[in-house]
Image (cartoon, rainbow, N blue to C red):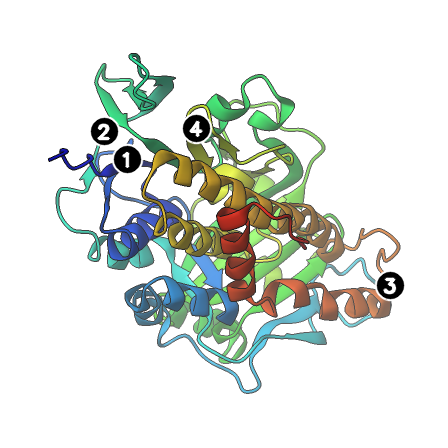
Amino acid sequence: MAAAADPLSIAVVGGGIAGLTLAIAMLKNCPHILVTLYESANEFGEIGAGVGFEPVMVRTMGLIDPRIAAAFEKCSKGNTATEPPRWFTVRVGDERKKDVTSGEEVFVMPARTGPRGGVHRAHFLNELVKLLPEGIAQFRKRLQNITEAEYGSGKVILHFTDGSTALHDAVLGCDGIKSRTRSILLGDSMASKAVFSGKYAYRGLIPMAKAIDIMGKGTPETPQLYMGYRGHVLTFPIANGTLFNVVAFSSRPTWDQPEWVVQTTREDMLNDYEHWNPAVRTIMENLQKPDIWALFDHPPAPTYYSTKLLLCLVGDAAHASTPHQGAGAGMGIEDVYILSELLSQCTSKSDIAKAFHAYDAVRRPRSQKLVKTSREAGMLWELEGEGVGDDLEALKQNALTRMNWVWDHDITEDLTRAIGLMRDGTSAAVQ
């Protein structure tokens, strides 16, 4: 009697939101595949504070695993909800815009009905960690290279900076915007590294009680977007409504420093908003750490996968975007749904190659569109959108429809198309 074939073994590189949700999804949907998650840090952790998810993304979490959606809702409950739901109340915060009263509502960006809102990244990650069984994750494993194994096994070897190695059938790169797996996949291509977007941000958290004390009740408890020339400011509640999250953007032509997060002086930070109204200046004066976060994004990659190494990119490793449309993390959730469902049907390495091809065909156009349009949104909020500028009526018309393609998308149709591609290789129209 022939010996049973060894089960497929897949490495997930990176333990952020995308990597954790992918590992959870595979453990649920792919019992025939051995999953190991490699994280470079000593423990799981996320950089940054708030991250937002809209109903389309939360529904996708539920399709992956209802426990993931429940984790999100646990972290988002208590954030003030409005009816009808609002994405942001849009205001002009820059007093140099003369034909409008600074600070007054210009228009409301409506959101979609359903579970949504901002969560603290670390809080959400902590809830996801609870869903990962012990023994799946290995820490202090920083990837150095991936090579083909010898002897025609078709396996790949992961080489880590501590000198250790690991043997797997395939690798899923979830290692973020500074992705090593992306560099390995794309080599010397200009698309292998992220590029500076021309924007940077100050980020901070203020206790909600203090925010209400300095700004009054109402405004701090609902999402606000203040527009200005070469800058804009977002505020929204996170952490069950106990924290006031601030992301204040500004512009510069280049970024010459090796680090993406650098300290600046309080004076320089406040100078960026010297022409803004008292509400915005008050917000900025209450930020405790004047760190600058440079905003990078990825040029469009010609592919998200390699059949030679059986390597596939997921989330920010594939399509890191600027945050100006609030959908970067959600795109990673969509990736996880499609890829985990395809992998659930794989029983061989050749199946995995077909799954990667189908995933790439379906996910790459949509996710790369987000990178492009997010850059455009950053220009829009800073009164320099192409063909729009500081014409508030034209800006409103652009803003009110620009998120439809993200929010009204049916991810299950994408899965149907991807499964068709995987099974018979037929081409399919991709949006």
Check if mark 4's residue and mark 3's residue have beta carbons within 8 Å: no
Closer to the N terminus: mark 3 or mark 1?
1
Disc 3 target residue: 391
Circle 4 or circle 2, nearest the eye: 4
Disc 1 target residue: 39
Check if mark 4's residue and mark 2's residue have beta carbons within 8 Å: no
Check if mark 1's residue and mark 2's residue have beta carbons within 8 Å: yes
Circle 2 or circle 3, nearest the eye: 2
In the image: residue 93, left or right of residue 414:
right
Closer to the N terminus: mark 1 or mark 2?
1
Closer to the N terminus: mark 2 or mark 3?
2
- Local crowd size for mark 4, using a 10 Å CA cut-off: few (<14), some (14–19), many (≥20): many
Residue at horizontal 13 percent and vertical 42 percent from the top: 135
- Provide the secondary structure element on which disc 1 rests: loop
Distance between the Cα atoms at labels 3 and 1?
Answer: 47 Å
Mark 3: which amino acid? Asp
Disc 4 target residue: 181
Residue at horizontal 62 percent and vertical 51 percent from the top: 366
Mark 2: which amino acid? Arg
Check if mark 1's residue and mark 4's residue have beta carbons within 8 Å: no
Distance between the Cα atoms at labels 1 and 2?
Answer: 6 Å
Disc 2 target residue: 140
Circle 3 or circle 1, nearest the eye: 1
Spot occupied by residue 293 in the image (x, y as percentages of width and height):
52, 39
- Provide the secondary structure element on which disc 4 rests: helix
Spot occupied by residue 8 in the image (x, y as percentages of width and height):
26, 37
Residue 125 marker: none
Above or below for 178 versus 418: above
Distance between the Cα atoms at labels 2 and 3?
Answer: 51 Å
